[in-house]
Amino acid sequence: MRLSTMGRYALRAMIDLACYGAEGPVPRYEIAARQEVSEQYLAQLFLKLKHAGLVESVRGPGGGYLLARDADAITAGEVLRAVEETLAPVYCVGDDEDATCSRVDGCPTHWLWKRLGETIRQMLDSVSLSELCTHAHWDAPKDDKARGQVLTYSTSEQGARDVQ
């Protein structure tokens, strides 16, 4: 299973809201700057996230985006599914019931892929945005306002992206 750019960026944007949205709406341009994602791309993501009931938008001066629920109540799995991300390792165990393989009944690996897909979904559905926010590490801001701080990412030895 490989997550798309859309899924990864949506999750990063939602973690950003969880970390920075406690004091009010977070402007899209701030999220774009911190996450190094274009504002136009974020607009597309937030539209999907809004339709899924995960974010709310506030128009006008002081506007931006807010989480629709508490960060403890929104999971990584919900965010990924909201942007149409499949969490299945192979198509024959995905959400689309029509996408079955003609060999499924005799396939020696089908049960493995099904278990792997269930494990992936359970894991992603067990991790909240607030938990992910606690794993976001960035330098302490120079003043008492955290807004405007840019998150940077590096790649660890294992190839995973780590937030710095």
Image (cartoon, rainbow, N blue to C red):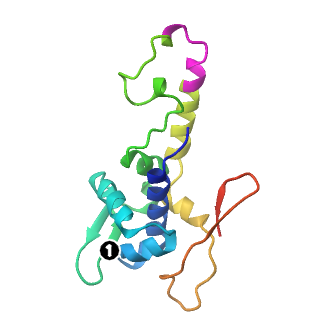
Q: Which quadrant of the rendered structure holds the C terminus?
A: bottom right
**Residue 95, x across and y down, in percent:** 40, 31
Q: Would residue 156 be found to the left or right of residue 126 on screen?
A: right
Magenta-span inclusion, residue 110: yes
Q: Is residue 26 visible?
A: no
Which residue is labeled 1 in the image?
64
Crowd tier of the residue under label 1, counting other residues whose Cα lies within 10 Å: few below 14, some 14–19, many 20 or above: some
Dominant secondary structure, magenta: helix
Nearer-the-camera pick, 53 or 70: 53
Q: Is residue 101 left or right of residue 107?
A: left
Residue 136 lies left or right of residue 104; in this view the side is: right
Report the span colored magenta.
105-113
Q: Nearer the viewer, residue 68 or 164?
A: 164
Placement of 36 over or under 92, stated as above or below: below
Q: Residue at x 37, y 23 (%)?
A: 97
Which residue appears farthest toward the bottom when viewing the image? 143
Q: Residue at x 38, y 64 (%)?
A: 42
Name which quarter of the figure residue 85 lies in: top left
